[in-house]
Image: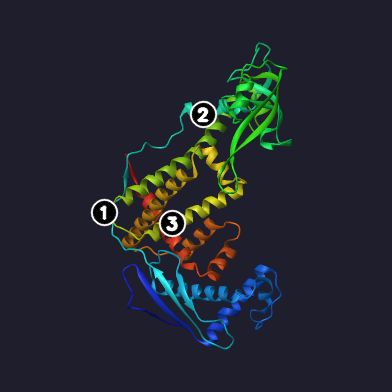
Amino acid sequence: MEYKINDSIATDLQKQIEITLDTEEATKKREDIYAFLAIQAGIEYIADQGSQPFEKRYGAEVKENVAQCMANQCVDEIIRKEGLPAALEPVVQSTSEIAEDEPFTCTVLLYLKPEAELSSYEPVTLDIPAFEVTDEQVERNMRAIIEQRAKYVDDVDAKSATDQSVCVITLMTAKMGMPVEPLCVEDHPYTIEGGKFPDPINDALRGMAPGETKKLSFTVTSKNFLGMDVPETMDAELTLKKIVKKDTPEITDAWVKNNIPGATDVANFKEMVRENVRVHARADYDRLKAEAALNSLVERLPEMELPEIYEEYSRAGLLQNFTAALSRQGMSQEEFYNAQGITSTQFMIQMSSRARDVLKQGLALDALARHLGLEAEEGDVEAALHAMSSKNADDARKMLKMNGRLYQLDEMALRSKARGYLLDHVITE
């Protein structure tokens, strides 16, 4: 592979790289990509078949995609060989056509990180208390566990529903005769103060007596596919079956032995809870400590103005992780916004702020790594791979290699190593 940097447009933050593969190199890369794609897609492929088996499924544009992949693999090798501080994913500006027995050329634009230096490389000092698990935390968690195991019994003294009453209700709601599933429940424990049904339903329930049924109609506003507000009328039938209360048990050795798996008595139960709190609270404490240490390190960076595309790239990465997390939980973005009590606009403002923080934290860790002369060794890279995909680390490495993103793995490993050094040397007061 031959390559050269176009000095006519090179800047401190950009480099345009012109790359040429000879026929043998181009053929090898192309065949490797086709073979990998065949495995991913479950397509039978014999060497030297070219793009034909893939065009039947993906269309003629598969050649363009393979050319993009070849360009990314080439620049990935250059980044790693030259130690170029790539800031964003490379932009493939042009490629030659994929052709048998022909060389391959491409032009790639590379955005670089600014190599800013920190004002100090002394250990970070944080004004945070030492970690401890208090008796109050243990008692609170024990009460929560007991509350979860408490049984509901009829509240014979309750004559009507209040905002705090635990009401067992059946609710059937319809729109134009069709059930509205989120507003249909049967024998469902519900409190007005903690519930999420529309206000007209809560207003109807408030003051109802056990055994009473009410019919009501109300209007809600939704948006159509054009984003316009549309009023919709709902018809509901609400029945208050009964009002119940929790029968919280007294904590005794006998109750603990019969109801808490693995515990033999109250003292043993308390120690189990203390250990559980210690593990989870320690994780939260370490996370907050790490964030505080990173923010303190960021304060040592000089003021700098980066092109908007840097922040956009950081934000896009955060949004991709956010969307994947929601998908794993089976939650839509609208459901998330409603649960958090924010609008999509407010969320995007928060993401922009977080993107700037993440961008600066990365630059600060890069500076620390350079100052310390840290290098990402194979063990560091393996740890980064397992953090990325603990069950399929080898597959993750192959995917990064095929996509021309091994340089990102190197960056992740080096930053993780610098982060470890930072946290190991934090001074707390």
Give the foreground label among 1 and 3.
3
Kind of residue at disc 1: Ser
Answer with mark 1 or mark 2, whichever residue precedes in sequence: 1
Answer with mark 2 or mark 3, whichever residue precedes in sequence: 2
Residue at image point 37% right, 59% down? 308
Give the foreground label among 1 and 2.
1
Q: Secondary structure at mark 3?
A: helix
Asked if disc 2 and disc 3 are in contact, CB closer than 8 Å, the reply is: no
Residue at image point 36% right, 64% down? 113
Q: Position of residue 272 (x, y in %)?
A: 57, 33
- In the picture of the structure, the residue carrying the numbered disc 2 is 138
The foreground one among 174 and 427 is 174
Q: Residue furthest left?
A: 119
For residue 314, the mark is 3
- In the picture of the structure, the residue carrying the numbered disc 1 is 120
Q: Secondary structure at mark 2?
A: helix
